[in-house]
Amino acid sequence: MKIVAIRETTLDMAEATRNAAVGFGRMTASVAVVEVETTAGHRVRGYAIDSPGRYASGAVLRERLAPRVLAADPAAYLDASGTLPDPWKIRALAMRDEKPGGHGERAAAMGLLDGAIWDLIGKLQDKPLWAVLRGPKLGTPQVPVYATCGFYRGEDDLEKLRDELERAVDLGFDTVKIKGGAIDLDADRKRIDAALEYLGGKAKLALDCNATMTLNDARLFLSAIADLPIAWVEEPVDPLDYDAHRALAAEFAVPLGTGENLYSAADARNLLRHGGLRPERDLLQFDIGLGHGLVEYLRIVAEAEDAGWLRENFVPHVGYRFALQVAAGLGLGRHEVGPFQRIAYRPAMAGACALPGDAPGIGWEADPAFASLFAALDR
Amino acid sequence: MKIVAIRETTLDMAEATRNAAVGFGRMTASVAVVEVETTAGHRVRGYAIDSPGRYASGAVLRERLAPRVLAADPAAYLDASGTLPDPWKIRALAMRDEKPGGHGERAAAMGLLDGAIWDLIGKLQDKPLWAVLRGPKLGTPQVPVYATCGFYRGEDDLEKLRDELERAVDLGFDTVKIKGGAIDLDADRKRIDAALEYLGGKAKLALDCNATMTLNDARLFLSAIADLPIAWVEEPVDPLDYDAHRALAAEFAVPLGTGENLYSAADARNLLRHGGLRPERDLLQFDIGLGHGLVEYLRIVAEAEDAGWLRENFVPHVGYRFALQVAAGLGLGRHEVGPFQRIAYRPAMAGACALPGDAPGIGWEADPAFASLFAALDR
């Protein structure tokens, strides 16, 4: 088996929405394909796509990581059988001559390469990725999900919010998340009260503040919603301000979620060491693809388990079908679904759980929301 | 005044050398220009260049940061006089719709834009940048420097080491730094002993380990050199492993330096909060350009001063003439010079100090090592 091509392109992910940190009017993301030729002469393709929110990272893949892999002797990246790529060897090859620290766009580019390799590993064994990760003895897993809705909109904000929440309940979701943490606390509280009213107790409500509040603003926000039944509050403060997380976890009972803007095991370790988060209630939301990929994520999960965290604490940021397969394979707590975003991601569901399916690899081609996005890569 | 163009290109920075973390065989860096048209109709250009080691970051500048600035009304980025760009406004504009955290290639691209703006601010006032930062009452500053030499080489390693150290002493340097932290402790110790012999007491010796040792390997390394007169040891462990820094600072007397792979005020704050470093001896080596630029650096310096650190503790990573101007203007401890690297940077010196000169702005055009590098941008 030999890697014969690594290609990427940039997707337009623009939407007329915003969260507390960013507007999505010029948002982009990368999609990538890794193509291999098997010893029998067949071509097989593995695909990957970024979670939205951090822009395309294709230049790093194109200029640095891909040339290192393509220049290597296949022996340097094949596993012991000689028929499968070894994701750990690919990672080491692609990241050769890269300094430690500074985990930004590079982490996302590495995650694209890693995600496409895991897709290939499933396809080359004719197994869905969750079965590769979980082993053959367990039945088809079902993964609890939640629906991300309620981005801020300049026009018709509350009408769109009501429409999305009602449709999410109709689709079967028992938990939804909306944006919070905008400057005006009163307006935010009214919007949250409205969301609870629209849901009418049919689904739990979580809030996502996108990390722009100061510690004191976060205290005011959490105090203002302390009487409400909120499932969790995401990113109340800067993702790197571990002391602020420690303070909020000590002062407020509501579960906290964070980690989607920390892109390495080194950063994740710091959050667990210094952030004062509580394994009995808080959520670890590291993004698998934006954070170097599954090789790094497996290390983060293992280290967190050693520190007393459970698989249920892990609720990866977006990641679409890749995150679904990993959540199913590893038995993670919950999977994020954005059914009303520019990519209308709607995995097959059974009740309030998503089903990763039996398609080999990650199953991107079997999902109409993604199949067409990868077409531009299939030269 | 109006910004009319922002351009960048990638420089080949390849060298047949390595440190403990990376080889430089395919190294690149970005250069950038910001061109303004004054109200009198004159065109003025500000320049910036990355420190080497992290590859070019031009795609982020080209795809995200520059279009935001170029699309803005000049009123959004001019200072109160209307004649100068305001670096804080430029920063906010360029970073609009960027999420917190993940400070990697984006931080370097922002640093290019920031550096070019500061060059313009000097030129538009006909003052060297150090005088803009320092105010008019102080005389021409002199900045203590050290020479970075002794990268690992596959061939003739010790001969090249001897040659560089002797030439550094001849050039007037009273402090030099060589690489350390390679796997084989005995070979490293022999190389360090040789360097001390070559220097013959004419210059102090510092060591740069480039952040690849585990905590225990770092303990072995620091124990193995504990009897030697070493000025400081740089990056013994991963830049994000604050607990490991804390352990080493508690166990070893030698001054430690770190920070060149931390690219934001949030990361710098974590190092100072959690890293256990000692203001009476340790060095803070944040890279001004790779870490969002001078706007961010001024914030880091101010916060560190509040925490008991002195300007003398700040020894920025590379940065060339931009870092020299900032060190002169702010009165920082020392400036890094690489006289024998691919860009043979040799600022004018008086004794063992570098002189930033009187050229307006940063003075790139007056320095033959840089003038030609920016030529490709001058369409």
Image (cartoon, coloured by chain):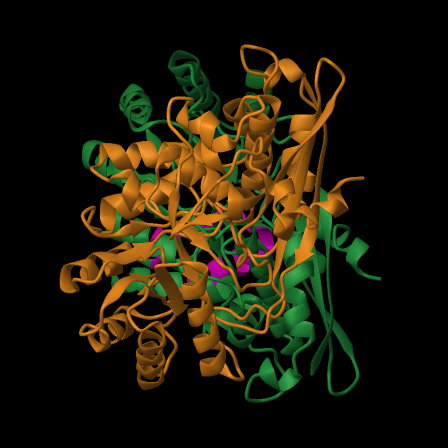
Chain colours: A orange, B green
Does residue B333 appear in this view?
yes
Task: Please name the residue shown 25% across and 73% down the image.
Answer: A216
Does residue B174 appear in this view?
no
| Start-end of magenta stretch | B311-332
Side (left or right) of A347 relative to B71: left
Task: Please name the residue shown 67% across and 21% down the image.
Answer: A72
Of A242 and B118, the residue lying toward us: A242
Count of picture labels: 0
What is the magenta segment's predominant secondary structure? helix
Q: Position of residue B341 (x, y in %)?
A: 63, 36
Of A247 and B185, the residue lying toward us: A247
> Which residue is most to the right?
B379
Side (left or right) of B321 relative to B44: left
Q: Does residue B56 lie above or below A176 as drawn? A: above
Q: Position of residue A161 (x, y in %)?
A: 45, 76
Q: Does residue A233 lie above or below A274 as drawn? A: below
Side (left or right) of B247 relative to A82: left
Residue B246 sits in which quadrant?
Answer: top left
Q: Position of residue B347 (x, y in %)?
A: 60, 50
Of A161 and A350, the residue lying toward us: A350
Residue B325 sits in which quadrant?
Answer: bottom right
- Does the stretch in magenta take in A152? no
Task: Please name the residue shown 60% across and 39% down the image.
Answer: B339
Q: Quadrant of the N terminus of chain B?
A: bottom right
Of A299 and B192, the residue lying toward us: A299
